[in-house]
Amino acid sequence: MIDPEFKGNIDVYDKPVGKVIAAVKHNFKEEDFTVLSATKQTIGFFYGTLKYSMSGNQVKGWIKKGKYTGIYARNYEKHLTTCLYSCNILSVV
């Protein structure tokens, strides 16, 4: 997910540390916020789809992990451990 209060641009890359292919930001006027569905990750990037919740416009690519990005587990089973990687630090939730 993307922090709903983040006011900056989110650069979308063709590959980690690659070329910027798009820049998106929340549309506060229309209340059309971006939502990230990540399917892959590296130490510093998520790969997935950034989609506007109202208009449905979307872009696929890599985005840098930062204070504006967050994730949640789709699997809520208690016996499984979710590992989160951010800023080269491993956190187990």
Image (spheres, grey):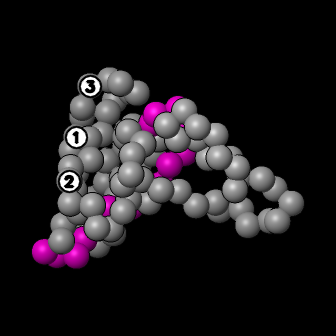
**Of 46 and 82, which appears nearest the observer?**
82
Q: Are marks 1 and 3 in contact (CB under 8 Å)?
A: no
Q: Nearer the viewer, mark 1 or mark 2?
A: 2
Q: CA distance from mark 2 to mark 3?
A: 19 Å
Residue 68 can be seen, yes or no: yes
Residue wearing tag 3: 19
Disc on res. 8: 2
Residue 15 image position (x, y, % from top left): 39, 27
Tell which circle, 1 or 2, labels the residue nearer the N-terminal end. 2
Task: Give SS at disc 1.
Answer: strand
Look at 54% across and 33% down and name the residue there: 88
Q: Check the picture and name the quadrant holding the N terminus.
A: bottom left
Q: Tell me the amino acid under the disc marked 2.
A: Gly
Start and end of the magenta stretch? 29-45
Residue 6 image position (x, y, % from top left): 27, 61
Look at 38% across and 51% down and name the residue there: 67
Residue with the most extreme top position: 18
Mark 3 burial class by Cα count in 10 Å: few <14, some 14-19, many 20+: few
Q: Tell me the amino acid under the disc marked 3.
A: Lys
Residue 52 can be seen, yes or no: no
- 91 w.r.t. 52: above or below: above
Q: Is residue 1 magenta?
A: no
Q: CA distance from mark 1 to mark 3?
A: 9 Å
Residue wearing tag 1: 22
Q: Are marks 1 and 2 in contact (CB under 8 Å)?
A: no
